[in-house]
Amino acid sequence: MAIQVVLVYKPNSTLDNLRSIVDAERDMEVVADAGDGRSAVHLAIEMKPEIVVMGLLLPRLNTFEATRRITNEHNGTRVVIIGKYTDKFIIDQVLEVGASNYILLENACKELPKAIRTALHGSDYVCHDPDE
């Protein structure tokens, strides 16, 4: 059975790119997508996916609060955050509120499938800065 993934990202062009990455994996299936944090929480409640992949900056309900709600209320759902920032403070905050993994948007094509699989198995994963 395929890993069920909900994608949440703004803008839509990036959301479409993320969908293409996930759809290319035989063991993964995008079951829903959205563009804001409130919808992410709603979809997690309704669909009970194994993984929610969210952008770091979301409207309507920020990513930190959406992650906290999803991981607290839906214990089986794991969260992977995609962002543009390499700041250790931001990454630590994302992991502290319950995200399993953080990857850089610019590395998503290569890192997203690995981050999803790693989160599913309960391990943390943080993508390294490509400039290091």
Image (tube, helix red, strand yellow):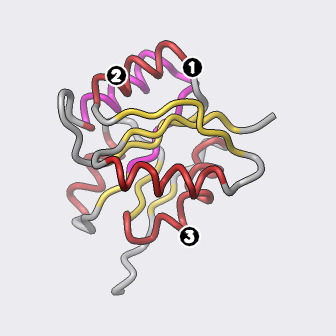
Task: Give the position of the N terminus as an image quadrant.
Answer: top right
Residue placed at 47% from the left, 14% from the top?
45
Q: Which image quadrant is residue 72 in?
A: top left
Look at label 2 and name its amino acid.
Answer: Arg
Magenta residue span: 64-81
Would you name the residue on which mark 2 appears? 69
Is disc 1 placed on a helix, strand or loop?
loop
**Does the magenta segment cover residue 28?**
no
Front residue of 82 and 102: 82
Q: Alpha-carbon distance for marks 1 and 3? A: 26 Å
Secondary structure of residue under mark 3 = helix
For the residues carrying marks 1 and 2, which lies nearer the camera in this image? 1
Q: Nearer the viewer, mark 3 or mark 2?
A: 3
Q: Position of residue 68 (x, y in %)?
A: 33, 28
Residue drawn at point x = 18 percent, y = 28 percent: 60
| Above/below status of 126 relative to 39 | below
Residue with the mark numbered 1: 48
The residue under the point 34% across, 47% down is 12
Observer-nearest of 58 and 65: 58
Measured in 3D between alpha carbons, the distance from the residue under mark 1 to the one under mark 2, in whole angstroms, is 13 Å
Residue 95 placement (x, y as % from top left): 36, 46
**Tag 3 residue:** 110
Q: Amino acid at mark 3?
A: Lys
Distance CA(mark 3)–CA(mark 2)? 28 Å
Contact flag, marks 1 and 2 (Cβ < 8 Å): no
